Image (cartoon, grey):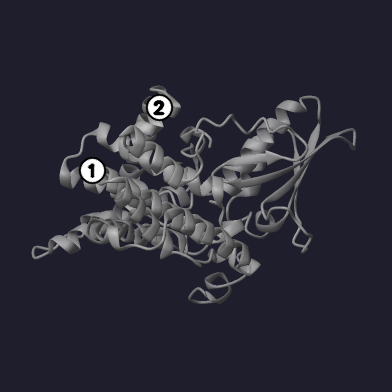
Amino acid sequence: MESLKELYRIGKGPSSSHTMGPERAAKRFKEKNLHADSFLVTLYGSLAKTGPGHLTDVILEKTFAPRPVEIRFDLSDKPLSHPNTMELSAMQNGEVVDFQRVISVGGGKILTEGEAAPDTPADVYPLSSFAEIKAYCTEHRIRLWEYVAACEGDSIWLYLAEVWKCMKDAIQRGLETEGTLKGGLDVQRKAKMLYRQKHIDESAETRENRLVCSYAYAVSEENAAGGTIVTAPTCGSCGVLPSVLRYMQERRGFSDTEILHALAAAGVIGNLIKTNASISGAECGCQAEIGSACSMAAAALAELHGMELDQIEYAAEVAMEHHLGLTCDPVRGLVQIPCIERNAVAAMRAINALSLANFLTYTRKISFDVVVNTMYETGRDLFSKYRETGEGGLAKYYTAKGE
């Protein structure tokens, strides 16, 4: 498996697959064709159907500037190897001088057809299933974060420290910002209101829900506004992990070092899902994004609380299991409805998974590896309209007031 640096990417929202990936592909193609006088980009599948809502065209125009770029949205049912497919052509005097077909596989990662993937770094983790990693850690009497350190080296802690800082900054910006998100849905930012809406007789449970949700809303709203966030594992699901980590640090007083250890444990979970299934909503529905984020958050919480490997596995497994089949149906292709709210719900569900792991771990029947395989097969079986095309579910039936 790859380094956690490839999972936790720092960049601007609103979509790792629709903005970060295409931006990365465009930068590389532009640098390769310095003598081109213009460019042509054709977007297919989910990139074509929800690209405008995800600002794909905006990021491509900015990236290719000052040279002109023509962007075509191909809405045909052309067979594709991956639903996030794009073709880039470099033009000179009206003639095509270079051509690439690229897929954006989620989390900001891209693969270029016909190339020995310069975008694919060497694997640093020799094991690629939780069962194998658990057996290794048990044999060597180490925790998941120690396994990460053994594979990545000490430099990973500097990177994760940067990740944690970015996560906290995104929360703080979101809590301080009000107004309406762009895109035409008239979605009001809610994080600041949630954070400040206290009641004298507020119970501990209500306070926990309110704070966790306000943090999740804060990061997700920043993402929807094109702010700087961390893919965890994607832009659309970036609010889940930071929200539970900040809340638990405030509530329990965990140190930043302990938070970094939790990020490492969560990273192993995210990496396993990315390697053995998918973190792309266009490929496997929202279960691959929000479900994965919830699974990562549950594992992080279990690590923070010093739970055993079996308990960490159970927390991650139950968090994913109960997102199976979740569709990706963004209204108007925007990362707003239902995406922002889902981050908050998944954050609370991660805390619920932690509680179940604390009590019921040794009665479980389903392994983490099994649920990951199940998620992948379920996602591939989902009807295409429910995989980030903006054609089914809420995206089909939602009607704004006055329309």
Q: Residues within 10 Å of mark 1 (few under 14, many from 20)?
A: some
Q: Residue at x 71, y 50 (%)?
A: 85
Q: Quadrant of residue 190?
A: bottom left
**Circle 2 sits on which residue?**
150
Disc 2 vs disc 1: Cβ atoms closer than 8 Å?
A: no
**Residue 78, position in %: x, y?**
79, 60
**Residue 348, position in %: x, y?**
30, 60
What is the three-letter code of the residue carrying label 1? Answer: Gly
**Residue 20, position in %: x, y?**
57, 41
**Circle 1 sits on which residue?**
306
How far is the residue under mark 2 from the one under mark 1?
Answer: 19 Å
Q: Is 274 or 238 nearer to us in this picture?
A: 274
**Residue 395, position in %: x, y?**
56, 69
Q: Residue pushed farthest left?
A: 201
Q: Residue pushed farthest front?
A: 139
What is the three-letter code of the residue carrying label 2? Answer: Ala
Query: Is residue 387 left or right of 317 when viewed as pictured?
Result: right
Tell me: residue 382, above or below residue 5.
below
Mark linked to residue 328 = none
